[in-house]
Amino acid sequence: MPNTPAAPAALRRNPGAPASVAVLGAGLMGHGIAQVFAAAGSEVRIWDPDGDTLASVHRRIDANLEKIAGWQHAPTSQASTGDRVSLSGSLEAAVSGVEVIFEASPENLGLKRNVVAQIDRCNPEAVLATNTSVLRIGDIAAGSPHSVRVVGAHWWNPPYLIPVVEVVPSEHTSDAVTDAVIAWLEGAGKLPVTVRKDVPGFIGNRLQFALWREALNLVEEGVCDAGSVDLVARNTFGLRLAAMGPIENADFIGLDLVRAIMDYVLPSLSAASSPPEILTTAVDGGRLGAKAGQGLLDWEQGDRERAHTRLLHGILNALGGERLP
Ligand SMILES: NC(=O)c1ccc[n+]([C@@H]2O[C@H](COP(=O)([O-])OP(=O)(O)OC[C@H]3O[C@@H](n4cnc5c(N)ncnc54)[C@H](O)[C@@H]3O)[C@@H](O)[C@H]2O)c1
């Protein structure tokens, strides 16, 4: 037997990671999804209609890797990650012949349906995973003759750090497609969670927006100021959440107590089915948050970048990472 040298570790593909991936939309989520598969050894093609966004993909992946360098357990730190991401000149060139397509275009139903229709014309065979945050997968796939291959794969930002990806089959998605996406995500080191019903917001965003509705309600009702909401959330149940989820926590304290508290407190919680006035007034007044320098809080120059770094380090800490000396 000839003694053939093993492929360099950096070029080997994790068992289960897809061989070829296309990512459509190279924004915040798209470039991070590309980074994850490239780090797992997949060949990744990425396309974005905005030339500047596309051209900055490698720079942004390098910046991500730099930010988490020096942390133990920081995933996707291989130096060659960027080498496996190639920029495509068109949607057609990106999707041609790949096994799986991750769609990360803007959160707009009409636009996403249009992207699906374009992909249907260029590559009707590949699995098509949409990274929609809240839209029903069945609504995105409606009208596609290939809806069996459309599935939700809802990543969380930043995709290269947050372990869970919610996998959402619609009523038309085949089991084989759902299973393949789960296997590929596992191959890329992710923790896929299947959502059994194609409901708006899936699991995580339903929970998150239920919390945000009450957070805004507290401020609107004058119970406390905006800063106090965050102070309490971060320094009470927020400290527990990464260690114990709400269901286990309910069991932990005793369901009789949970029922008694719900009996008393639920009638006073917000059950609003539209955004609160405090939010619509801010948006209409151009107070859009960190990017505008003013939102529900004041944002000074540099605050957003500092908050971003604090967020990344907080996530790495929660994942059990430790900054190396
Ligand atoms: N930002 C988050 O935290 C987050 C988390 C999970 C899921 N998502 C979802 O991921 C998707 C992308 O969000 P994002 O935050 O990366 O937005 P983004 O604005 O950063 O990126 C979207 C990119 O899509 C490009 N684009 C525009 N038209 C396109 C088309 N027809 N085909 C392909 N690309 C097109 C834009 O040029 C832009 O670069 C949305 O559906 C969003 O809801 C976002």
Image (spheres, grey):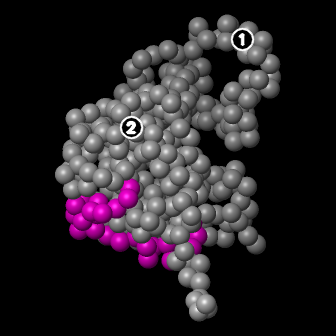
Q: Return the residue nearer the eye: 288 or 177.
A: 177
The span shown in magenta is 76-100
Q: Is mark 2 within 8 Å of ligand 1?
A: no
* Label 2 Cα crowd, 10 Å radius (few <14 / some 14-19 / many 20+): many
**Is residue 95 within the magenta segment?**
yes
Instruction: Tell me the amino acid under the disc marked 1.
Output: Arg
> On the picture, is 22 further left or further right than 251?
left
Q: Residue at x 68, y 29 (%)?
A: 246
Foreground residue among 314 and 176: 176
Q: Is residue 197 left or right of residue 115?
A: right
The N terminus, quarter of image? bottom right
How far apart are the two marked residues, 1 and 2, measured between alpha carbons? Answer: 37 Å
Q: Which amino acid does the dot numbered 2 rest on?
A: Thr
Q: Position of residue 282 (x, y in %)?
A: 38, 32
Q: Which residue is mark 1?
A: 259
Q: Which residue is mark 2?
A: 173
Whether residue 51 appears in this view of the structure is: no
- Residue farthest to the front, as pictured: 1
Check residue 263 for magenta coloring: no
* Mark identifier at residue 240: none
Mark 1, other Cα within 10 Å: few <14 / some 14–19 / many ≥20: few
Tell me the element at label 1. helix
Which of these two is toward me, 30 or 136? Answer: 136
Residue at (38% x, 59% y) in the render: 99
